[in-house]
Image (spheres, grey):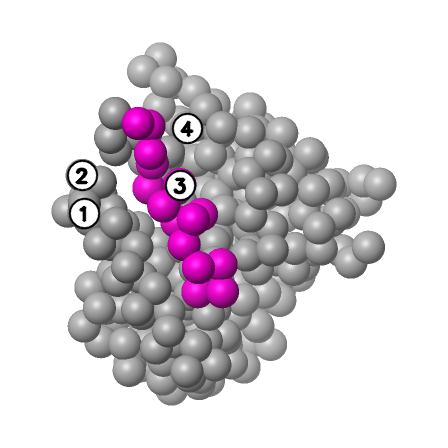
Amino acid sequence: MKEPITGVQLYTLRDYIQTAQDFDQTLQRLHQMGVHDVQISAIGSSITADEIAEIVAKNEMSVCVTHQSYDKLCNDLPTVIELHQKIGCNAVGLGYAPDTCRSTPEQAKAFVETLMSIAIQLQTNGLQFHYHNHDFEFKALSPDGTTLMDLLLDSDPALIHFIPDVAWMHVAGKDPVQLLETMHNRVKVVHFKDYVPKEDHRPRFVSLGQGVVDLKACFALCREKEIPYIVYEQDDSWEENDPFVSTKTSLNYFETLHAMH
């Protein structure tokens, strides 16, 4: 059984990667924490692909996947391809589906068709498309109960892969382990995130191991299915209002998972 590689989704540290200098310093800090694998997301738009590649290499980091905006995937795909080729990353992720693409069954079906078209173009350049879920993908779009996730899962498995977010699956009332089991052949990177429900049942995110998600069971499934990467992500509500503090706590939690057999 191959052990998953654990790392950090840089969206957690997005306020500290908006300039090349800050990006460099953030990767330095992560390297000092023992991190060697990251997902690039929400990085400053002024940082060039060459700068990103240089800073990633300088800090001995590997980029397992990225998040790109839907607009960029639709309208600036050559730039996306160029970035991935320069940083040696073969996985292109979409972090969020715009509201206008998922309000009706017709919109959702057209959206999935567009994603498959994008995925074909990526594959001709040696890259793979990956979709990252929130909870809205699990909401019924029509009286028959069909959801956007149903449409994505029914799409061509060679084209549409996934970046499953276990916390958002749990928020949606789903069993993350069961879903990981269903889609594991289409997964390179899993988002480990934890939360406690607020009074309105929306999530308040917490460091890994401090919430309601059964991350031990998720990790065991990832190990069993040999899913290559798991990255920690926390949208907000960091310990001491400092995402680096929460990152360190969560990395320590990863160590307990690696020790678990």
Q: Residue 107, which numbered label?
A: 1
Looking at the figure, which quarter contains the C terminus? top right
- Whether the residues at callouts 2 and 4 have beta carbons within 8 Å, the answer is no
Q: Which mark is residue 150?
A: 3
Q: Nearer the viewer, mark 2 or mark 4?
A: 2
SS of the residue under disc 4: loop
- Residue 54's disc is none
Q: Secondary structure at mark 1?
A: helix
Q: Is residue 259 left or right of residue 183?
A: right
Sooner in the amino-acid sequence: mark 4 or mark 3: 3
Q: Residues within 10 Å of mark 2 (few under 14, many from 20)?
A: some
Residue 31 image position (x, y, % from top left): 60, 66
SS at mark 2 in the image: loop
Please report the residue visible at 18 percent of the width from the left and 45 percent of the height from the top. 106
Specify start and end residues of the magenta stretch as a single range. Answer: 144-159
Q: Quadrant of residue 119?
A: bottom left
Residue at 46% across, 70% down:
128
| Sooner in the amino-acid sequence: mark 1 or mark 4 | 1
Which residue position holds label 2?
A: 104
Q: Earlier in the sequence, mark 2 or mark 4?
A: 2
